[in-house]
Image (cartoon, coloured by chain):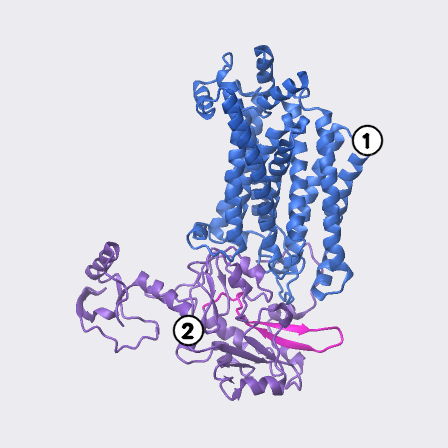
Chain colours: A blue, B purple
């Protein structure tokens, strides 16, 4: 690898690592404000109790749980996309694989916080580790998520080692000494000897395999939290695989969106091309088809028969939640399929729009899985209080939701200042392959 | 009763020394009915400094640290009453929504007004069948999903069939509330503002005081059962709707008459609500046949906030009700 080529790569892929632009501070400041608003909401909630949320005795889980499943689902981008792309040595994976891994770790770090917001006594969270009961799906979840977080972090780190070594060796890089030191420590003395290369490749393959398996377990367990209850709409055998597919759907959607964003702000047009969007778009297409099929299958069986509770639930979904239902389960699934199915429509902008719709629709899909079921308990709610009958999220819940998104953005921005957002070593490797 | 705490650990020793030297911290005797017979004395006397500065001599067996006492009380609440299997029978033909059970329960457990551990629903099974009043406590199921899903063991099933919640352990994840198909559980969304005397020892059998951010529910008045007393709702009901008893003795009583449980089930065709869910409730119902009063009587003389409950629910309105 000649050094000119490498320094060009470095310059292109880590534009923020040497200097910090003004826009970086502006965007970061805005996100920080959103985050602080969320913290204020959280303080309100701790101070006054959960009464400040829209949750009440019937709808005991609301937007927090929706966000929890949603963020956990996003982590699939890394697990399945980067894991499978890596294992199958897909030729076009180089520019997207790092992004996918970052999504995984960052969303995995954020997701569990929404569970903390939902829990009535925050200070007793350690009880889950102190007095765990293995019968409880929540304990399964804790074990699974912790494993996933560590696994994903290791997978991400292993993929970073080569890049850290490149950054360490880059002499003409104008960066602070502490960053140099950080790169030196993090690169673990990697110099690219054949033995080191072999070990690294082996570790990455092992981690990629494991991360796929763990991710499937995590999301199935998440689904079983709902599946094991007797509630209408939740008590479904399809929930495990259905949630897994939904997670991949949102993960791929987010990956496409972030690709579009980074391509634009870092001017990565040379590296992230239409080909990548189309390829990931096709992945999104296939997943959308599966997701639509699962959704249809789940609702068809509930709707066709006439079990009392299923009928009440379906009636609610088709009347009160009609708009949500149409958006989540028709528009959100059919739009990506339509856009990607027609070759003429496959532009970067269209595919990104399809991904945005898919992502939003999936959030709404989670919402109409959680809330309508809780509003239709077996023994009808008899109450005069409107908020006891119908759930509607309050500003506290929205502020914390926004804070979650803001933290996601902030963490991405911080990482992009410290390390290349596109894997340099992978790109070099791909180039070498092409040259051969 | 002999001290169960062994003196082997130095920490415990320290706590005990601390307790003995600062008598005001220790609680002498148990204000609560703990079921211990008072004749259990160790014979060893110790001097304690009481809160008003007097030295008093008490039996060592009656001294326990307030905290240790709570712990012991919680531990005892896990055990249940030996050789009992409690059962409740609710005679729907007699209920007229007098709501005395609700009041007695709320008073006895210091519940906020909007917390009902026993709810009275107005049910109608299908369009052409009759409406009926349906008191609904916790069913204390023999296959309780709420207990299975609790991640920290804050809710537990005892050998006498009672399901309790330890609100000192409960983390407030509300999984039990979504798992319970009968909506038996309530959540403390805000500080219930219940004050208890300083020397009050928390006991899950009574579950006072309610704690913000934790779950509460009907406890079958386990504290009264220890003293061979009937639950508060049973005693309060003017109609004798609720029978309570022991399956092992095959007898249930509403305080006025005592009946054989098995023959009641046969003669009056007892059933359990939503048997098909397989939760195996400990609460049985007698169908609302040959009613003593028309259903409408239950709608008279009610607060508007209560009578409005039983009106059909209008569709989602944009306006939010007051808190």
Q: Which residues are magenta?
A: B110-138
The residue that label 2 is drawn on is: B223
> Residue B214: image x %, image y %?
48, 58
Front: mark 2 or 1: 1
Residue B168 shown in magenta: no
As drawn, is A133 to the left or to the right of B286? Answer: left
Tell me the CA gap for discs 2 and 1: 73 Å
- A380, A231: nearer the viewer: A231
Choose top left, top right, bottom left or bottom right for residue B311.
bottom right
Q: Residue at x 67, y 45 (%)?
A: A246
As drawn, is B150 to the left or to the right of A388? Answer: left
> Residue A320: image x %, image y %?
73, 55
> Residue B53: image x %, image y %?
19, 64
Q: Quadrant of the N terminus of chain A?
A: top right
The residue that label 1 is drawn on is: A343
Pinpoint the chain carrying mark 1.
A
Choose top left, top right, bottom left or bottom right for residue B205.
bottom left
Residues behind callouts 2 and 1 on a single chain: no
Residue B125 shown in magenta: yes
As drawn, is A296 to the left or to the right of A271? Answer: right
Say few, some or many: other residues with alpha carbon within 10 Å of mark 1 (under 14 / 14 to 19 / 20 or more). few
> Residue A305: image x %, image y %?
76, 63
């Amino acid at each position: 690898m000649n050094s000119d080529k490498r320094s060009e790569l470095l310059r292109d892929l880590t534009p923020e690592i040497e200097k910090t632009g003004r826009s970086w501070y502006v965007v970061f400041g805005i996100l920080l404000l959103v985050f602080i608003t969320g913290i204020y909401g959280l303080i309100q909630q701790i101070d006054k109790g959960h009464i400040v949320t829209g949750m009440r005795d019937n709808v005991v889980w609301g937007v927090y749980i929706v966000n929890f499943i949603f963020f956990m689902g996003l982590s699939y981008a890394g697990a399945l996309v980067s894991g499978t792309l890596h294992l199958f040595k897909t030729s076009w994976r180089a520019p997207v694989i790092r992004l996918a891994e970052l999504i995984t770790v960052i969303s995995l770090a954020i997701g569990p916080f929404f569970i903390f917001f939902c829990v009535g006594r925050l200070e007793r969270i350690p009880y889950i580790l102190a007095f765990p009961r293995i019968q409880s799906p929540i304990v399964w979840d804790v074990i699974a998520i912790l494993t996933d977080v560590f696994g994903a972090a290791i997978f991400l780190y292993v993929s970073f080692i080569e890049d850290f070594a490149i950054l360490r060796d880059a002499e003409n890089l104008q960066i602070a000494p502490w960053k140099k030191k950080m790169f030196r420590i993090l690169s673990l003395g990697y110099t690219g000897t054949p033995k080191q290369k072999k070990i690294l490749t082996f570790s990455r393959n092992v981690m990629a395999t494991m991360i796929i398996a763990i991710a499937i377990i995590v999301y199935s367990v998440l689904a079983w939290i709902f599946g094991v209850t007797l509630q209408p709409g939740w008590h479904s055998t399809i929930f495990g695989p259905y949630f897994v597919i939904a997670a991949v759907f949102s993960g791929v959607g987010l990956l496409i969106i972030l690709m579009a964003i980074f391509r634009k702000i870092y001017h990565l047009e040379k590296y992230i091309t239409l080909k990548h969007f189309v390829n990931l778009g096709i992945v999104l297409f296939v997943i959308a088809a599966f997701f639509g099929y699962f959704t249809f299958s789940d609702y068809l069986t509930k709707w066709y028969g006439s079990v009392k509770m299923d009928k009440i639930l379906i009636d609610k979904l088709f009347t009160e939640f009609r708009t949500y239902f149409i958006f989540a389960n028709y528009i959100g699934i059919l739009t990506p399929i339509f856009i990607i199915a027609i070759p003429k429509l496959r532009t970067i902008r269209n595919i990104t729009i399809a991904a945005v719709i898919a992502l939003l629709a999936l959030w709404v899909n989670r919402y109409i899985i959680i809330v309508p079921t809780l509003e239709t308990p077996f023994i009808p709610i008899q109450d005069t209080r409107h908020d006891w009958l119908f759930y509607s999220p309050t500003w506290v819940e929205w502020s914390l939701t926004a804070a979650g998104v803001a933290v996601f953005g902030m963490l991405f921005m911080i990482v992009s200042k410290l390390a290349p957002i596109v894997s340099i070593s992978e790109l070099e490797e791909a180039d070498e392959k092409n040259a051969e | 009763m002999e001290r169960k705490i062994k003196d082997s650990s130095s920490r415990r020793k320290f706590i005990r020394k601390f307790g003995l030297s600062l008598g005001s911290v220790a609680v002498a005797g148990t204000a609560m009915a703990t079921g211990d017979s008072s004749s259990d004395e160790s014979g060893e006397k110790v001097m304690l400094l009481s809160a008003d500065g007097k030295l008093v001599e008490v039996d060592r067996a009656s001294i326990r640290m307030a905290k240790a006492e709570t712990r012991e009380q919680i531990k005892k609440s896990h055990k249940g009453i030996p050789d009992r299997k409690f059962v409740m029978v609710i005679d729907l033909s007699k209920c007229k929504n007098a709501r005395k059970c609700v009041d007695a329960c709320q008073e006895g457990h210091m519940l906020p007004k909007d917390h009902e551990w026993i709810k009275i629903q107005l049910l109608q099974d299908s369009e052409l069948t009759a409406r009926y009043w349906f008191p609904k406590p916790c069913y204390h199921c023999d296959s309780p999903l709420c207990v299975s899903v609790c991640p920290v063991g804050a809710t537990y099933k005892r050998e006498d069939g009672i399901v309790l919640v330890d609100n000192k352990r409960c983390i407030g994840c509300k999984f039990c509330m979504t798992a319970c198909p009968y909506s038996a559980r309530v959540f403390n969304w805000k500080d219930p503002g219940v004050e208890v005397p300083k020397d009050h020892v928390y006991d899950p059998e009574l579950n006072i005081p309610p704690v913000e951010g934790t779950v509460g529910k009907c406890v079958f008045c386990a504290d009264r059962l220890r003293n061979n007393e009937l639950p508060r709702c049973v005693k309060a009901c003017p109609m004798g709707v609720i029978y309570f008893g022991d399956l092992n003795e095959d007898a249930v009583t509403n305080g006025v008459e005592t009946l054989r449980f098995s023959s009641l089930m046969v003669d009056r065709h007892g059933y359990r609500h939503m048997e098909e869910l397989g939760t195996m409730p400990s609460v049985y119902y007698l169908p609302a046949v040959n009613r003593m009063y028309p259903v409408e009587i239950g709608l008279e003389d009610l607060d508007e906030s209560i009578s409005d409950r039983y009106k059909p629910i209008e569709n989602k309105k944009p306006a939010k009700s007051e808190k």
